Every structure is written in structure tokens, then in C-alpha cells.
Image (cartoon, coloured by chain):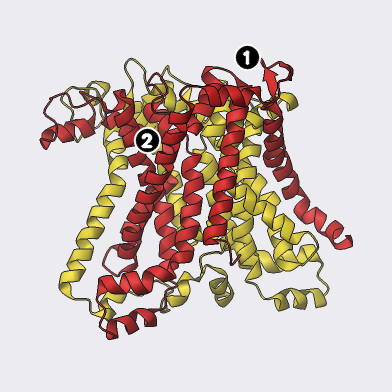
Amino acid sequence: MAAITQTATPPRKATRPPSDDGRRVRRYTADQVPLGSLLLRLLAGLVVLVVFLLPYLIMFFGSVKTKAEIRSVDPTYFPREWHWDNYVTMWSTPETPLLQNLISTLVISLCATLLVLAVALPAAYYTARFRFRGRLVFLFLVIVTQMVQPAVLTSGLFREFIAVGILDTWLAMILVNAAFNLSFAVWIMHSFFAGIPKEVDEAAQLDGAGTFAVLTKINLPLVWPGIVTAVVFTFVASWNEFAASLVLLTTAGNQPLSVALTKFVGQYETSWHYVFGVSIVAIVPVVILFMAIEKRLVGGLVAGSVK
Amino acid sequence: MKDLLKALPWIGPAVALIATVVLFPVGLMFYNSTRDISQSGVDKGGVGLDNFATVLGFEAFWPILGRTVVWVVVVVACTLLGSLALAALLNKAFPGRRLVRMAVIVPWASSVVMTTLVVHYGLEPYFGIINSFLVDVGLIDTPEGYGWTRHAGTAFAWAMVVAVFVSLPFTTYTILAGLQTVPGETVEAARIDGANGVRTYFSVVLPQLRGAISVAVLINIINVFNSLPILRVMTGSIPGYDADTVMTMIFKYMQNQRQIDLASALSVIAFLVVVVIVAVYVRMVRPLEEV
């Protein structure tokens, strides 16, 4: 099983020498890099680390400052006192019903993810396993949706959802998020299914298993890394979606956090400490999720074209 | 035909979702762009190409289009150069590399709105922390800093900085994936032939990254062209149209002016621009050759 999933993941693992515990071999000890260039790399790495984390550190430090401190004309880099109670009081700010926004974000992202899974998994399995007329047309259709983004379609979606009567509902954004993340999910799972030798399926079929049983009992356990990747990616993308939500959700409570937080900008006295507290709450979980699928992120996005 | 029927239960739901939420709105958008739709949403009949004439005749249209080109070209070019350097570093072995790689992911997973918000706050005069830093290191003379977000030009420039920042992770990871398929022997051979590191990179490694780079650039062009949140947060409160791109203008038509017919016409233009860019690019670079 380990061997199979290895070939199914994008090819980057192939060039790396294997190690017993499955972790990356520390090549810098083996390669005997000159100390000077090693230090140079370390220094560069440190700079990159700081630059990429800096906005989020500013966010974090800001989230525990008082309103007086964060709006002080003599700004502080680090909080003078750590006001953790901001994380409690921020939910009842007058600008927008943040707690409802959090619930909306959660419901929309979870439902969109489930929908993507229910729709993409069978399609990915079938197109990877069976040749049929229209297969390439379908795969082309999926690639095309990756080229189109909801932002450019919002005027059409807006009118469509008015006509259907689901404008300003969670369902509208569940459908949009599911549809526009479908291509990533199909491609990443497709590549995993394609990595399982056909003989495995055929052996099961000889034993009398139907197509559905072959999928659930034989294939699913082998492709779960692909499924996890698709699930996490869809969830995070839906979690952060902005453009379509901005237009399609008009009631404040229905809007996700990404839309709700923009309402603080341009206020007479923006409560930046609350904006940052909510941002930290919204960012930390999805960053952790994304780190879990780090190795497989590229695979679905570039649809196997990085060779 | 029979095997397509057999496939239908498996791919049918996906086709239905794409048809209703992607293809149908495209059609509806084209249709609406030829209608006269009132602010309350009533369709008052067809007007041919009048909406396009209105959109193209708007005095700020051509500056907006030009700014959109600058936005896409500058952001994608800077992203590519930055990502090539980042990927080269992250492909080298050094202690803590894994930690640095994880840090590079953070802007990718984070909400673009929230990342832009913190920069916007930092750029505020008087209490913004970026302004405060620039004053502390002596780059700005006025003690309250500079009103970066108050002027269209500087706000737009900072929006480009943020756009590059949030585009770097995906691009870096794509190039990194490409780098890891470059056979070590080819690099070794170049070294033995006496090429130094820089020369090896440009004559041996870079050509083999062509596939990865072309895909990354294509996806970046589409993403950056379609990007709304950064400019919306950074320049949205500036009156006038001096910091708008095609995408932010679509949303101004839709939200501020409630002219869904004009928004549809501009969306159609934007949609066709993307289609043309993708078609030309795919013909020239053939990034999808191996799919």
C-alpha cells in the first residue's frame, strides 16, 4: 500500500532518497555543504521566515492591545499589556454580528466541502478507471472551470439566484463554492485513482465485487490522502471566499467573516484590535489544515502538467 | 452512447453542478449584457449593444483598462521573480528548511481580505505600524507618517505589493515541485564541466522549469486579473476611479450604482479578455501539453 500511494503522489518524492521512518533525509549532513554557504542559506531562510510571518505577527500583537493603544499616535510594536479578554468582547461589536458571521462561514464551508466530496469523488473514480465516449469532454469541462472564477460571473449568478429565489441564502454560496472548487477536487482524486493498478480492481471483480463495492472497499482506503487534500483545499478556499459572497449575501448575518470584516474599514474609529482578533481566530485553524496537506497542494492545482 | 449512459450516475452530478453554477450564469451574463435592467432589477427589454457602448464610452474606462494591464503584468512578473528565488532557496538543504516552507504557506491559507486589512492598518497615518516603522528608521520626515491609503497612486502601489505577497506561496510551491524533478545528474554534469552555480542555474536548471513556470504564470494571470479583495480593501474608500481595475469597476457598477446590465457588459468584456489571454498563452507556451 505504501508503494502505491508513493507513485500516486506528485513526482517530487521520487528524487528524494528514502529513509526508514519515512521522513525527509537531512541531506545537508551528507552533502557536506561548506559552512559559509550553509550560514548564508540559514540567514536567507530566517529573512524569509520573518517576512512571511510578519503581517500575522502584527495581527496577533494588535489583537491583544486595547483600542486606545492600537489607535495611539505613538504606536507600539508590542502590546504594553496583553488583553486576552478582547477575544471574548470582540464578538459583540456593533459593526456586524460577528458570531453569526462565524457560523455562516462554518456552515457554508462545511456544506460546500461535503457537496464537493459527494460530487467529485464518483466522477474522479469513474474517469480514472473507465474509458467512455465523452470522458475527455468532461475532463476538459472540469479544467475550464478552473480558468473561470466566481468574481467575473457574479452578475450572472446574482440574476440567476434571484430568479430561483435563493439569493442571500447559505445555499447559494454552498453551490458557488462547491462548483468552483470542483476542478481541484476532481483532478487531485483522479490522479490518486489513476495511480492504483487496474489489476487490484480486476482481482476484486473476479471475486464478485460490484463497481460500487470496488470503489468503497478497495479504492477508498488507497486514495484517502487525495480525499483529505481535496477536502482541506475546498474547505479553506470556501472559508476565505470573498467576491461572490460580497454580492450574493446581502443580510449582514448571512455573510462570512471575510465580507463582514471589510465593514470596519473607513469607520470613524475602526476597532482594529477586534478586526485582528477575529482574523487570528479565522486564520489559525485553516493554516494548520493547509500545512497538513502541504506536500500535495501543487498536484491538483496544476492538473499534472508540471512534469 | 451506451457507455455514456453507464457513466452518467458517476459524472452526472458534477456535470449538473458545473452546468447550473458555471455555464448557465455565463450565458445569463451575456444575455443580460444586451438588456436594459432597472436598478430594482426589472428587465425593460433588449437594447442591443448599448450597454457595451456605455461602458466603453465611460471616461475612466481606458485608464482603468490600462491600469488593469499594469496590475497584472507587474504583479505576475514580480511574483515569478520572487518565487524563482524563494524556490531555489527552499530546494537547498539547510537546518530549519521545513519551518521556512511552512511559513511560506501561511499567506496562501489565510484570507486575502484579512492579510490586506493588516497592511491597510499599518499604512494608516498617525497610528499605523508601517508608517511608524518608516518614521523610526528615518525614511519619512513627518512624524505622523504618510497617508498611503488616502491617495489612489500609493494605495494602488501597496495593493500590488500585497498581491505579490499572497501570490508567492502558490507560485513558489509550483516551481519547487518543478525543481524536484530536475535530475541531479544534469546539474552534476554541468558542475564537472566547470560551470559555476549561477551559470548552471540559468543554462541547466531554468530550461527544465519551463513547464512549471508556464503553468504557474497562466494560473497567476487568471487569479491576479480576477482579484477583487486586495483593491477593494486598499483603495475601495478612495472616491473616483483612479485606482480601479476592470474587476473592481464591475463591482462598483453592481453595488454602488446598481446597474446590473452595465456590470454584465463589463463582465462579458472581462470574461472575453481572460479567454483570449488563456488561448494566446496556451498557443504560445503550451503549458497544458502533457495533460
Residue at 62% over, 34% down: B268
Q: Decide which of tag 2 and tag 1 comes sooner along the chain.
A: 1
Chain for numbered disc 1: B
Q: Position of residue A162 (x, y in %)?
A: 70, 24
Q: Are marks 2 and 1 in contact (CB under 8 Å)?
A: no
Residue at 43% over, 26% down: A262
Residue at 15% over, 71% down: A36
Residue at 77% over, 76% down: A202
Task: Provide the residue designation for mark 1.
Answer: B39
Task: Provide the residue designation for mark 2.
Answer: B116
Q: Amino acid at mark 1?
A: Gln
Circle 2 Cα neighbour tier, 10 Å, few/some/many (<14 / 14–19 / ≥20): many
User: Which numbered marker is on residue A18?
Assistant: none
Residue sitting nearer the eye, B276 or A143 = B276
Q: Is residue A272 left or right of residue A35?
A: right
Q: Colour of chain B?
A: red
- Please check whether the numbered discs 2 and 1 fall on a single chain: yes
Chain for numbered disc 2: B
In the image, is residue B148 above or below residue B84? above
CA gap between label 2 and label 1 equals: 31 Å
Q: Amino acid at mark 2?
A: Thr
Q: Which chain is yellow?
A: A
